[in-house]
Image (cartoon, rainbow, N blue to C red):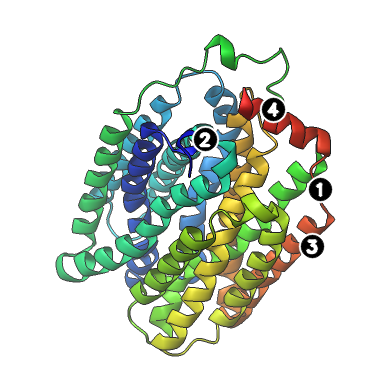
Amino acid sequence: MSSTERLPRDFYLVTAANFVFFLNFASFFLLPVHLHDVGASAETIGYVMGTAGFAGIVLLPFLGVLLDRVDRRRFVIAGGVVMAAASYAYLLVPGASPVLYVLRVVQGMAFTAAFVTASTLAAELAPLAIRGRALGLFGISTLLTHAIAPAVGEVIARRLGFAALFAFAGTLGLGSAGLSAMVRAARTHDPARRVPAGAGALRREPVLWLTAATMTACGMGFGTVLTFVPTFVHVVGLERVAPFFLSYSLAAIAVRVVLGGLSDRVGRRPVLLPAMAVLAAAIAVLGLVGSVPALVAVGVAFGAGQGMVYPTANALMVDLSHAGNLGRVQTLFSGSFSVGVAISAFVFGGVIERFGYPRAFAAAAGCVVCGMGLLWLAPPLSSAMRIASVSRESR
């Protein structure tokens, strides 16, 4: 990597803040276990978990506009503080109280504000020549937490109870806010970064919107797994879900480290389609798992697929952005994926209640296959758009 392609200090600082923030967020992957223990049904668990996603979606249209107009750090800092407050508030909620829905709304909005803003800052700070690799590295800060938080969280919950886990998560939220405050203010109003009036609107390129729809389909598959694999593992008698999250996270990290720059060299779509096929296959066979080795194997395949899908699709959509609408594009990308995750929680809880886990996971895999079809239909990025993108980065 040449000197002109080195990532700046603030990129690493934003990545560190995102890591600590996601340690908080990923600790709540175990919330379904807590709800299951207090007698909640799979359908109720899906409603509680899905509430956060829909709450964040409501915020997205406003957030996308604000990100292109004000100091983005404020949203990351505020997200960490609010997430911490919500985590501590769980200490006051008994069992499966309806108050949980309120807390999930607060968490969903805080998560959306912090994560979308952090990913926007990361995309802004990443040079075009290594954008795919840079966003893959940023994503590693998320994936590490998917391995660490459930493993540590299970130990804390088993030994000290879920109250201790909620307090631990709250402290992490405050830590992420502190790291975010150390990021230098982005000079969003510099003359060099001004764009013509009206240039902040999203482009009408079909590839942009079809990629967004593809991410919604992928979000449905991904969300079904993350929401229901903790209770599935307990139902089939495997007791611990940590091996799945650990294998999934390590596999995703490995492919991003080894192949993170592949889409920069061969193109986004040639990487996306095979990765989505691997992701769909892993989700489809998850419902057939009956042993820890099989759970780990599926986790590896799931991580390999998701580890390439998310940053590559993100890079594809960022390729269609510019300084005046990067916040909107990142909001569209994150929002599309979040819509899929939220829908999955609401829909597949009922599917599990009526048809069982294997059919629910198979249907979720079918959603990803539908996303592959949408991506296949998307026209390639026009030559004019590619030239304009490279030109903007060279200035």
Q: Residue at the spot x=50%, y=79% of the render?
A: 298
Q: Secondary structure at mark 4?
A: helix
Q: Position of residue 216 (x, y in %)?
A: 66, 53
- Residue, disc 1: 380
- Residue, disc 4: 391
**Label 4: how many residues lie within 10 Å, few (<14), some (14-19) or many (20+)?**
few
- Residue, disc 2: 120
Going from the N terminus, do you reach mark 2 or mark 1 first? 2
Could you tell me the amino acid type at mark 4?
Ser
Q: Nearer the viewer, residue 359 or 333?
A: 333
Q: Nearer the viewer, mark 4 or mark 3?
A: 4
Q: Nearer the viewer, mark 2 or mark 4?
A: 4
Q: Which residue, as the protein is rendered here, is positioned at the far left?
A: 160
**Label 3: how many residues lie within 10 Å, few (<14), some (14-19) or many (20+)?**
some
**Label 1: how many residues lie within 10 Å, few (<14), some (14-19) or many (20+)?**
few
Q: Secondary structure at mark 3?
A: helix
Any mark on residue 373, and which?
3
Q: Residue at the spot x=60%, y=30% of the render?
A: 326
Q: Position of residue 253 (x, y in %)?
A: 44, 62
Q: Is residue 59 left or right of residue 217?
A: left
In space, the residues marked 2 and 3 are separated at their CA atoms by 27 Å
Identify the image quadrant of residue 305: bottom right
Q: Which residue, as the protein is rendered here, is positioned at the far top?
A: 191
- Residues at marks 1 and 3 touching, judged by CB atoms closer than 8 Å: no
Residue 304 vs 88, above or below: the answer is below
Could you tell me the amino acid type at mark 1?
Pro
In space, the residues marked 1 and 3 are separated at their CA atoms by 14 Å
In space, the residues marked 2 and 4 are separated at their CA atoms by 20 Å
Q: Position of residue 164 (x, y in %)?
A: 18, 57
Going from the N terminus, do you reach mark 4 or mark 3 first? 3
